[in-house]
Every structure is written in C-alpha cells, then in structure tokens.
Image: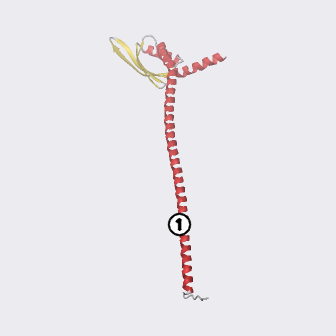
Amino acid sequence: MATRINLLDWRAARRARRKKEFLSLLVLGLGASAALIGLGYVTVEHSIETQQARNQFMTAQIAEMDKQIKEIQELEKVRANLVARMHVIEQLQQSRAASVHFFDEIVNTIPEGVYLTAVKQNGQSVTIDGIAESSGRISAYLKNLDGSPWFKDPKLVVIKTAEKNKQRNSEFTLQVTNLTRAVADDAPQAAKGEVVQ
C-alpha cells in the first residue's frame, strides 16, 4: 500500500476553494441584483406607462368636457338672443294696440282750428307741435288732452303768434305724458276680471 503525500500547501487549496465559492456567490448575487433591478425597472416602466395612459385619458376627457362647455355657452348665447327677441316681439304685440289708441286719441282731442305739424315721443313724454287759429283753441286742446284717460299733465311749452297770408296764427309746442301703454295693459286684465265674475 502506497502512502500518498500531498505536497500542495493545504492553505493555498483552501484559499482557492474559498475564492471559487466567493466568486460563485458574487456572480450569483450580481445575477440576483440584476434580476431585481430588471424587475424593478419593468415594474416602474409599467407604472409610468399606466399613469401616462391615465393622463392621456384624462386629457382627452378634459378636452371633450371643454368642447361640451363651449357648446353649452354657445347654446346659452343663442337662448339669450331668442329670449331677447321674444321679449321684443311681446313688447311690440302689447304696444301695437297702444299705438292705435295713441293716434286715435290724438285725433279725437284736436278741436277745430288746430292743426298738428309734428308729434314726437320719447318714452312716455310726447311733444306736440302745431298751429292754431287762436290761443283759445290751444287752451281747448290742452283741456281735451287733460280730460282724456290716455294722457296726463299737458303743459304748454312755447306759443308764438305769426301772421301768414293776412291771417294771425299761433304756433305752439306742448308736452303731455302718454298713458296709452299703461291703460292698454290694464284693459285686458280688467276684461279678464269681468269674464271671471
């Protein structure tokens, strides 16, 4: 039987074995670290992509809502215009009868010998220009206007006497408050009240 003698240094062999084990563990650790880093990277990338998709969805939804808000604002403008037009039409419908009463009453209150040259209305204030054969006829006209339910507060503003074609005439300007709209508005309500009774 032969004796085997190991001439190698046992410490060097142990050092080499430990070095191999260390390198194996190092490679294994690096591999595990790389795998963990890769997994973390993939997870973060996936989270970023998911968040970007959510952001894009929210951006698209916000753009859609902005578009709808703009459409609603345009519809509100159209609605406001239509309401304004309807209001104007209603006022014209209501004032149509008032205008007829106004001119009818202007004609009915004019006494003989008085001729009108201009009638101007600003709101409820009416300015009447005319020519009368005498100052007494202007006074009669003022009384007629004061007695009318369609007018109130007649005031003589200017009176001038002029002679044309050997005739003395009085040119006048007077102001009166027009009540035709208020009386016309009250008339349908009164008629409704009578029907109910």
Q: Is residue 36 above or below residue 24?
A: above
Residue 152, visible in the rendered structure: no
**Residue under circle 1?**
34
- Residue found at the very far front of the displayed protein: 1
Nearest the camera: 13 or 110? 13
Q: Residue at x 53, y 75 (%)?
A: 23
Q: Is residue 54 above or below residue 157?
A: below
Which quarter of the picture shows residue 161?
top left
Nearest the camera: 26 or 54? 26
Q: Is residue 12 above or below residue 72?
A: below
Nearest the camera: 78 or 162? 78
Residue 1 spot, x, y in % from top left: 62, 88
Residue 196 spot, x, y in % from top left: 66, 17
197 on left or right of 31: right
Nearest the camera: 146 or 51? 51
- Residue found at the very far right of the displayed protein: 197
Q: Residue at x 52, y 44 (%)?
A: 61
Residue 98 spot, x, y in % from top left: 51, 19
